[in-house]
Amino acid sequence: MSASPGISAPRTSTPKTAMVLAAGLGTRMRPLTDTRPKALVEVAGKALIDHTLDRLEAVGVERAVVNVHAFADQMEAHLARRTSPQILISDERGGLLETGGGIKRARTLLGEGPIWVANSDYVWLDQADGGLAEVARRWDADAMDACIVVIPKARTLGFDTPGDFFGDPEGALTPRGAAGEAPLHAFGLQILNPQPVYATAAEAFSLRNVWFDAAARRRLIGVQPAGLWMQVGDPAALDLAEARLAGRAPPS
């Protein structure tokens, strides 16, 4: 059973459009990213971005906007082989814009309504509904600016950070701030109202700025799907994820 608080029938429709953030340099994944974008590094025989796109397709996404920068030609060629979801490219060859800036740049492709947003460096083991279905069930556009996946540290692999958020019984999130640690790791998987992103004056900025503003107004909600959730940020984390997906003991 899920540990997510307050799951109820959806009050608003689930987005059919997603932004997949894949433009990063992937410096922590070197040497694998010396010759390819991080999103094309394979885990269990499948490129990281395809793990993400397959999950989004399973939750009803019909169109995915993917931003590209490093080895952009490789990314475009790889994505051209997909037939579903429909892929649109947001070109950031001219310069990286960070997570928030990347979404803002893609506005004409994404539209004005709520969207899925997903990083391309996560894999997870969970129940049949894929975890993201819980985000879809909880999403309420009237009450939230973002509904994001947050996972207790004990059910994560690949993180070396002190945690991101505290959550209350209703799922409202509070940033770690000056605290030494927080119990929940934030995954870059969410349904987002993009209007606060579009309204940000800066060209390049982190989506976390928008999260923190939403948290101050109790409009940032966390969902904690069951399963083991893994960030694949460096070669050691890649080895851990490969082992867990294959049902092997983690490498020592």
Image: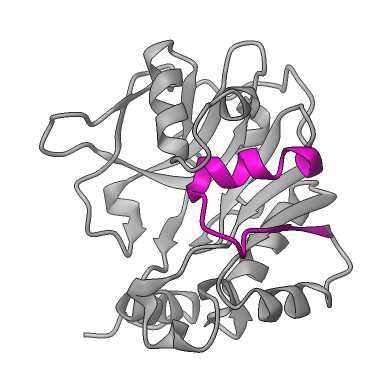
Residues drawn in magenta: 87-110
Residue sitting at 43 percent across and 41 percent down? Answer: 206
Q: Nearer the viewer, residue 98 or 143?
A: 98
Give percent across and percent down for residue 207. Answer: 47, 38
Instruction: Return the residue found at the far front.
Output: 94
The colour scheme applied to this rendered structure is: one colour
The answer to whether 46 appears left or right of 56 in the picture is left
Q: In this view, which residue lies farthest toward the left?
A: 180
The spot of residue 98 in percent (x, y) is 48, 49
Where does residue 1 sit, x and y in percent of width and height? 51, 41
Quarter the C terminus occupies: bottom left
Asked if one can make out residue 107 in the rendered structure from this viewpoint, the answer is yes
Q: Which sits in the foreground, 183 or 6?
A: 183
Left or right: 175, with 15 as reference point: left
Query: Can you see residue 129?
Result: no
**Is 229 left, or right, of 57 in this rendering?**
left
> Hey, which quadrant is residue 199 in on the image?
top right
Residue 150 sits above or below residue 240 on the image: above
**Could you tell me residue 23's position as x and y percent?**
56, 62
Is 53 located above or below residue 2 in the figure?
below
Instruction: Check if residue 106 falls in the magenta segment.
Output: yes
Identify the residue shown where x is 34% and y is 19%. 168
**In the displayed structure image, the side of residue 188 where residue 163 appears, left or right:** left
| Residue under the point 62% across and 80% down | 46
Q: Is residue 16 magenta?
A: no
User: Tag count in the figure?
Assistant: 0
